[in-house]
Image (cartoon, grey):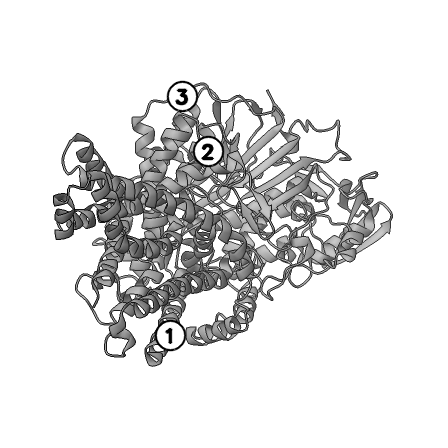
């Protein structure tokens, strides 16, 4: 072996050791050099056999990509003084530089049903009905709406007149029929929200009716993220069909836009920069502040960099301030943190339906099937401690797995269970688990605010009543399939309710798991009576009767301790103090409502 | 000689195939892309249909084979995350990474060689000690830490340089460059220092030790005995002989700068292929991950193959078919 080559190998090894980064490419290089034979010191870098070790892969992904920067920045934030030099004043008054962790996935308004994608689309496209920044339903492209007096299966909409698209085309009922039909087509990700729709008909140039299979009392809530496209534009540009990502397709509409919204797309480089500009022909001129005339949107993945960009004045608005940096941002004289409860509740699910658990140490029995165990566990969670210590006050402890905005929420339901440890221990002893048992808790580590630390805190709390919890925290791409495939007995889940109605929670989380409903119910809970009530909600038109049924289902869910609620998440927007807005509970800023101080 | 070339080429192909195999066997553990592709309202039937149409239910060897068949025909699939051809995405991002790598490499080479020569000639003294001890920081601090420190000092506190992004870019055909605008150049400074610091230290230490070695050689002593000036000895005779191994190492380092730009790009939100890869890992965007890993290994294997061929050209023993 030649000297140079050997030196080279040493450097590669050194590089890897110092950077603790196991690159496949470098491994390939070394493998080639040593012809797949082990060389001392080399094996420590991870042979292909070792790379199949799940936990190891998890841990290096997390170590390298997630944790490091945050920890460091936390330290810097603590040591450095909060005083900054005079920050650059709000740039050019009307331009807003906006950053958040993730980017929109596509410009096709019906191809993805996902937060950041909808948020960007809301600036460009408009739905018939809109939730304003407070969460209230407001007229957008429809001015009047409601179920038909004659037929409860039909919803009637009166459309706004004089609305034009960015390219000058006029908006009318033809576009509504086209857009809703498009959103119901095979490759649309919005089709589940419209599953009850039978047909959409234009009854005039500015009136539309939607016929459903049976009455749908919450139709309005299903339309607030359903954007309207111009039929003529879509046809001219071969974008009638929704982008089929799985089929490997890219359409004109996935990169170009033509909406009726307050801003039009100027340029877009995915994951880098999206520029928007106020639309001169917007129908809402005079109705909305529309003080921001230009928007530059940049996703910044690394939380420390995102905060740094806000502190340095390079961006004016970030949507996700890490909790450890809140004080620093708020303490800056040019910045402010605005806070509001989010439409998302965090809770634990327990497998209470199976005869035996896979991950526990109790033979032949399922401890979670015993109501007393679930009650004891519910009491063992010290929600205030999680709020104070893990969340630094940035959460609202929850007694029910339902965000407070949702129809059906009452203060009584959201009352915290008593955290009486002695009573909890007594319940455990009563159930025959006085000596406790052990079980595995599955937890995501990149999905919710401080998800893994919450689980770590819970592990200690459950230990106090004798339950030894083994924590298994994984990235979301690995965590959620476990719930979908019933591979976990004890898991963390968060739930947002885009329709602001309890039926949405029941359909996905409470109903017995079946083809139609219960897809997120990992508890194996199955109660025929409850299922029947859930199905009845779909077509109950008498709202009082409906609300009574909702209350009844919640009472049953609470009695059965179906979920162990933890808290409602709180949103923290960090902005330049020139901006005046309230935080949207859906984490969807709509810039037409923003004003400048 | 021909058999040597053929043997090397076959070995290279084998390495590529092995890298792909390892990559595909690992994708199963990264997670399930289906959860990210469908909204929270998806039904179990949607999941099954999507898994089937993406071929995720196939054993990984089948998936690997399908990828290889596609790759040979120039089609590596469409990004699950962005719905665009994976290769097109990578090619669009490549200029950002290549420019960053180039600037870091120049920074590392120039500063590394200058400081290396300085510390070799002046073996002791406060400046040498200072350079050597601060260079330890370059080796021992992880990249993301250096990056965040630089952001903190130059972007947050001093507000001299931007903390993220590429600034304004100019499109030259398919290549977008940040080198032609002031904001683009300003944006390059912090990331390229972060990325190049380790290489700079490496080259500096290599130059220093090589040059110290050379300075002890007999021909240097003879040169001194001949009464040549220190300047002529150091720069005409010693440096030239020092640089040969340095250039070999530096060539390969460029490859690793490109491959290891991932962390720097994440810290600075640099829109290059490394950032694309990280986003793809989190989304489990298999076509992009696979294409990226394959391209990087093609690059490494290619450079290595080239180096081997250069040895062949230089070393007559190999040409005779005796060596290796």
Q: CA distance from mark 3 to mark 2?
A: 16 Å
- Residue placed most toward the observer, B283 or A406: B283
Q: Quadrant of the N terminus of chain B?
A: bottom left
| Chain for numbered disc 1 | B
Q: Residues within 10 Å of mark 3 (few under 14, many from 20)?
A: some
Q: Residue furthest right?
A: A204
Q: Residues within 10 Å of mark 1 (few under 14, many from 20)?
A: some
Residue drawn 46% across the image and 53% down it: B273
Query: Which residue lies under the disc numbered 1?
Result: B9
- Camera-side mark, 1 or 2: 1
- Camera-side mark, 3 or 2: 2
Residue drawn 38% across the image and 69% down it: B25
Number of numbered discs: 3
In which quarter of the view is residue A439 placed? bottom left
Q: Secondary structure at mark 3?
A: loop
Q: Could you tell me if residue B17 is visible in this image?
A: yes
Query: Which residue lies under the disc numbered 3?
Result: A84
Q: Position of residue B143 (x, y in %)?
A: 32, 44
Query: Which residue lies under the disc numbered 2?
Result: B162
Q: Secondary structure at mark 2?
A: loop
Label 3 in the same subunit as label 2: no
Q: Position of residue B260 (x, y in %)?
A: 36, 52
- Residue placed most toward the observer, A404 or A555: A404
């Amino acid at each position: 072996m030649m000297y140079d080559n050997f030196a080279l190998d040493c450097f590669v090894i050194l590089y890897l050791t110092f950077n603790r980064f196991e690159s496949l490419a470098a491994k390939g290089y070394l493998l080639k050099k040593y012809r797949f034979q082990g060389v001392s010191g080399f094996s420590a870098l991870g042979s292909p056999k070792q790379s199949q070790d799940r936990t190891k892969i998890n841990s290096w992904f997390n170590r390298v990509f997630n944790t490091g920067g945050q920890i460091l920045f936390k330290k810097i934030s603590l040591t450095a003084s909060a005083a900054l030099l005079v920050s650059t004043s709000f740039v050019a008054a009307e331009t807003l530089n906006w950053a958040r962790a993730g980017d929109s996935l596509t410009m096709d308004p019906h191809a993805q049903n996902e937060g950041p994608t909808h948020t960007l689309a809301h600036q460009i496209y408009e739905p018939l009905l809109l939730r304003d920044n407070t969460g209230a339903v407001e007229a957008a492209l429809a001015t009047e709406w409601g179920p038909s007096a004659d037929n409860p299966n039909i919803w009637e909409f009166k459309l706004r007149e004089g609305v034009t698209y960015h390219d000058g085309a006029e908006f009318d009922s033809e576009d509504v029929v086209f857009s809703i039909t498009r959103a119901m087509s095979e490759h649309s990700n919005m089709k589940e929200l419209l599953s009850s729709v039978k047909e959409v008909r234009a009854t005039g140039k500015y009136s539309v009716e939607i016929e459903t299979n049976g009455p749908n009392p919450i139709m309005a809530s299903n339309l607030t993220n359903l954007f309207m496209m111009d039929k003529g534009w879509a046809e001219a540009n071969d974008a009638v069909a929704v982008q089929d990502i799985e089929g490997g397709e890219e359409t004109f509409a996935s990169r170009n836009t033509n909406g009726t919204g307050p801003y039009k797309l100027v340029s877009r480089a995915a994951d880098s920069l999206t520029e928007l500009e106020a639309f001169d022909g917007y129908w809402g001129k005079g109705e909305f502040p529309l003080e921001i005339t230009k928007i530059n949107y940049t996703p910044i993945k690394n939380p420390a960099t995102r905060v740094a960009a806000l502190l340095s004045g390079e961006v004016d608005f970030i949507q996700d301030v890490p909790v450890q940096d809140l004080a620093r941002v708020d303490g800056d004289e040019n910045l402010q943190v605005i806070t509001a409860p989010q439409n998302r509740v965090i809770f634990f699910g327990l497998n209470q339906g199976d005869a035996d658990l896979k991950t526990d140490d109790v033979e032949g029995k399922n401890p979670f099937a015993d109501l007393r165990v679930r009650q004891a566990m519910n009491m063992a969670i010290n929600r205030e401690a999680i709020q104070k210590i893990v969340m630094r006050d940035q959460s609202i402890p929850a007694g029910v797995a339902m965000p407070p905005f949702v129809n059906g929420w009452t203060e009584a339901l959201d009352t915290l269970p008593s955290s009486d440890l002695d009573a909890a221990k007594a319940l455990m002893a009563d159930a025959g688990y006085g000596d406790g048992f052990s079980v595995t808790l599955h937890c995501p580590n990149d999905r919710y605010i401080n998800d893994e630390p919450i689980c770590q805190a819970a592990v200690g709390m459950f230990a106090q009543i004798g339950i030894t919890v083994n924590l298994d925290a994984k990235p979301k791409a690995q965590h959620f399939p476990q719930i979908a495939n019933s591979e976990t007995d004890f898991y963390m889940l968060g739930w947002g309710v885009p329709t602001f109605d309890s039926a949405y929670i029941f359909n996905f989380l409470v109903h017995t798991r079946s083809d139609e409903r219960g897809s997120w119910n990992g508890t194996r809970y199955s109660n025929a009576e409850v299922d029947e009530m859930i199905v009845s909600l779909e077509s109950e038109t008498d709202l009082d009767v409906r609300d009574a049924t909702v209350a009844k289902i919640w009472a049953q869910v609470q009695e059965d301790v179906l979920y162990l609620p933890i808290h409602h998440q709180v949103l923290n927007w960090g902005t330049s103090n020139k901006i005046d807005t309230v935080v949207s509970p859906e984490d969807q800023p709509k810039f037409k409502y923003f004003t400048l101080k | 000689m021909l058999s040597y070339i053929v043997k090397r080429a076959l070995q290279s192909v084998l390495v590529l195939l092995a890298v792909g195999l390892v990559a595909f066997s690992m994708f199963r553990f990264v997670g399930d892309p289906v959860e990210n592709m469908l909204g929270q309202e998806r039904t179990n039937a949607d999941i099954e249909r999507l898994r089937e149409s993406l071929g995720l239910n196939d054993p990984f060897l089948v998936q690997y084979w399908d990828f290889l068949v596609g790759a040979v025909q120039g089609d590596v699939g469409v990004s699950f995350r962005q719905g665009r051809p994976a290769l097109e995405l990578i090619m669009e991002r490549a200029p950002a990474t290549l420019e960053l790598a180039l600037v870091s490499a120049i920074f590392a080479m120039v500063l590394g060689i200058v400081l290396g020569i300085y510390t070799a000639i002046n073996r002791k003294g406060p400046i040498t000690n200072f350079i050597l001890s601060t260079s330890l920081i370059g080796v021992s601090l992880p990249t993301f830490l250096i990056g965040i420190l630089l952001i903190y000092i130059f972007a947050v506190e001093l507000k001299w340089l931007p903390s993220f992004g590429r600034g304004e870019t100019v499109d030259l055909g398919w290549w977008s460059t940040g080198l032609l605008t002031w904001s683009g150049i300003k944006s390059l400074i912090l990331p390229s220092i972060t990325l190049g610091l380790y290489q700079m230290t490496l080259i500096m230490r290599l130059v220093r030790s090589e040059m110290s070695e050379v300075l002890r050689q007999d021909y240097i002593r003879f040169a001194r005995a001949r009464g040549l000036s220190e300047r002529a000895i150091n720069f005409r005779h010693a440096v030239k002989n020092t640089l040969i191994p340095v250039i070999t190492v530096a060539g390969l380092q460029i490859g690793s700068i490109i491959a290891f730009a991932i962390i720097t790009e994440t810290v600075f939100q640099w829109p290059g292929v490394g950032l694309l890869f990280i986003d793809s890992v989190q989304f489990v965007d298999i076509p992009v991950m696979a294409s990226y890993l394959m391209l990087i290994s093609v690059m490494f294997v290619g450079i290595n193959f080239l180096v081997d061929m250069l040895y062949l050209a230089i070393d007559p023993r190999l040409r005779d078919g005796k060596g290796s």
